[in-house]
Image: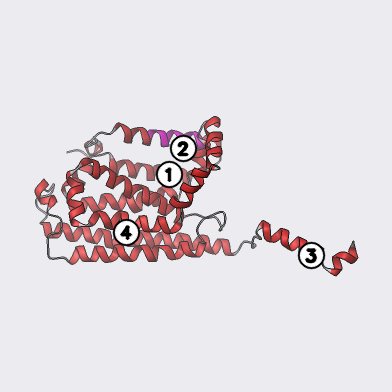
Amino acid sequence: MSLISLLDPWEPSFTLVAVFVAVAVLFARGSRRIRISVVRQVAFWIGLGLFYIALHTRLDYYAEHQFFVHRLQHLVLHHLAPLILMAAYPGSVLRAGLPLRWRIVLRRWQHTRPARIVAAVVLNPAFISVAFVVSVVFWLIPSVQFVAMLDWRIYTFMNWSVAISGLLYWWMLLDHRPCPPSRTRPGLRVLSPVITMTPQILVGAVITFSSQDLYPIFTLCGRAFTSVPPALDQSLGGLIMWVPAGVLEAIGAMMALRHLMRLSTLPSRVPPKARRGAARGDAGTPAAKAAS
């Protein structure tokens, strides 16, 4: 089998291709309208390419028939691809790629009450952090994994939930703005990987050192690499969740620390309400009255 043939889709999906094409077109249009560095452009295309390889190539076949490949697939969807993609800060570029009428509609919709409620829940740092951990740990429950690998609809939902939670988390972690307008304080962004990393490392260690075959579904479906014993396959999968995922989150924490140090050198911003209150207070001082 040639390397090119590995790019053939295992289960072709028109919806998936349409999403990738739409995102690629928007970014290409937006990068022509606003200035963006070459590094950011390269990061975006690498991240998008990794998402495509993990979701719509023959890698998906091996992920369905080998546990350690399945963990590699989720490592890419949950950590590596969203980390690289969000390091490009693509939001403003994608928005610039929309037609003017769509941008106006989007701006108006963002100020509606339903949009604010959805944003308050979905973009809440606590919700994002919990979803990031649950989207990995929940699908590793043996009974849940068994059902997910047998039903293609649940399997598709599993992969999408892992990818979306990863995008939300790395968007929050790599946010380089102060708070506000960011919803997360810079110090919390540095601490967050330590919190989210811990349960994933514990689950990875349990899987790695377990003497029981926790995921017999891969044997029932037929393993892609018959030369790899089930015990070794399971240990490799646990190590992938344990070590590389922890390294990537440590990298994210260092990037967040860099933003924290940069923000600490900027002059402190006074909120508008406090600024107006200070102005009113200065106006009432004896010096201000004497000057008037």
Total number of numbered discs in the rendering:
4
Which residue carries the number 1 mark? Answer: 44
Give the residue type at disc 3.
Asp
Whole-number angstrom distance, CA of label 2 to CA of label 1 = 9 Å
Label pair 3/1, CB-CB below 8 angstroms: no
Mark earlier in primary sequence (3, 1): 1
Classify residue 207 as left or right of residue 38: left
Q: Nearer the viewer, residue 238 or 121?
A: 121
By secondary structure, the bulk of the magenta-drawn segment is best described as helix
**Residue sitting at x 27%, y 62%:** 242
Residue 55 located within the stretch drawn in magenta:
no
Give the residue type at disc 2.
Phe
Label pair 2/1, CB-CB below 8 angstroms: yes
Q: Residues within 10 Å of mark 2 (few under 14, many from 20)?
A: many
Whole-number angstrom distance, CA of label 4 to CA of label 3 = 54 Å
Query: x, y percentage for residue 67?
Result: 18, 53
Which residue carries the number 4 mark? Answer: 245
Label pair 4/1, CB-CB below 8 angstroms: no
Q: Nearer the viewer, residue 121 or 140?
A: 121
Mark earlier in primary sequence (2, 4): 2
Give the residue type at disc 1.
Phe
Label pair 2/3, CB-CB below 8 angstroms: no
Which residue carries the number 3 mark? Answer: 282
Viewer can see residue 23 = yes
Q: Quadrant of the C terminus?
A: bottom right
Residue 22 located within the stretch drawn in magenta:
yes
Classify residue 233 as left or right of residue 36: left
